Image (cartoon, grey):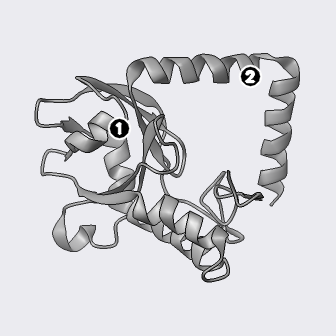
Amino acid sequence: HGTVGGSCIHLHEPPFPYLGIRSGARYLGRSFRGESVHKVDSKGRVSIPASFRRVLEEGDPDFAASNIAQVVLNYGVRPGECLEGYSITGMEEIDGRIRAVAPYSDERESLEFMFNTQSTYVQLDETGRIVLSARLREMFDLGEEVIFAGMNDRFQIWQPKAFEARRKAMSAQVANREGKQAVLAHLGKVAQG
């Protein structure tokens, strides 16, 4: 969730395909799961994990006609930490949530800036690679290796040392008995809808 103009806006709660829930209906699509290390070549090309490509293909309405999937890379949600990748339909769902916020309000403009202005469409090539521009590589200190991390309805691209720091922080939070109980309690609340 993000804080905008002093109010808390939750962006990954239903009706997102979070825990299999979408607008009250069961979401049966694939999710981004797992983590993997991938090499980045000198031109910024990196292979998307095969299982992530399947999610992107399912989430791209134009894939059947073109046989080429697209991804929306966002660099405004976690500036300086990691890139986030969304399928086309995943980003359309977020856009729908943003359109539900009052037009011209500070909250809507902040969300539009964070999700629309600070994102770009990237097309996968025939081998399942994308190009990370020099600007994006510089913004996130991405070198010769990156880590892809599945996050259910989105994936993240991390610089390895930053990912390891994030992993340690998350592991410490969940290892703490109270932290683990809070996470599981939230899981139960979301699943109940």
Dot 2 amino acid type = Gln
The total of numbered circles placed on residues is: 2
Residue at screen point 47% across, 32% down:
34
Does residue 150 appear in this view? yes
- Quadrant the C terminus occupies: bottom right
Provide residue 185's location: percent of width, then percent of height. 86, 39
Dot 1 amino acid type = Met
> Mark 1, residues whose alpha carbon is within 10 Å: few (<14), some, or many (≥20)?
some
- Taking 11 as reference, is 83 above or below it? above
- Taking 118 as reference, is 186 above or below it? above
Q: How far apart in space, not on screen, are marks 2 and 1 (Cα)?
A: 27 Å
> Mark 2, residues whose alpha carbon is within 10 Å: few (<14), some, or many (≥20)?
some
| Of 183 and 110, the residue lying toward us | 110
Provide residue 95's location: percent of width, then percent of height. 52, 72
Q: Earlier in the sequence, mark 2 or mark 1?
A: 1
Provide residue 12's location: percent of width, then percent of height. 64, 55
Left or right: residue 67 compared with residue 140: left
- Check residue 139 in the rendering and tell me which mark sits there, or answer none: 1
Does residue 94 appear in this view? no
Name the image quarter holding residue 176.
Answer: top right
Camera-nearest label, 2 or 1: 1
User: What element does badge 2 sit on?
Assistant: helix
| Of 17 and 3, the residue lying toward us | 3
Which residue is under mark 2?
A: 173
Residue at screen point 32% across, 59% down:
120
Provide residue 171's location: percent of width, then percent of height. 66, 19
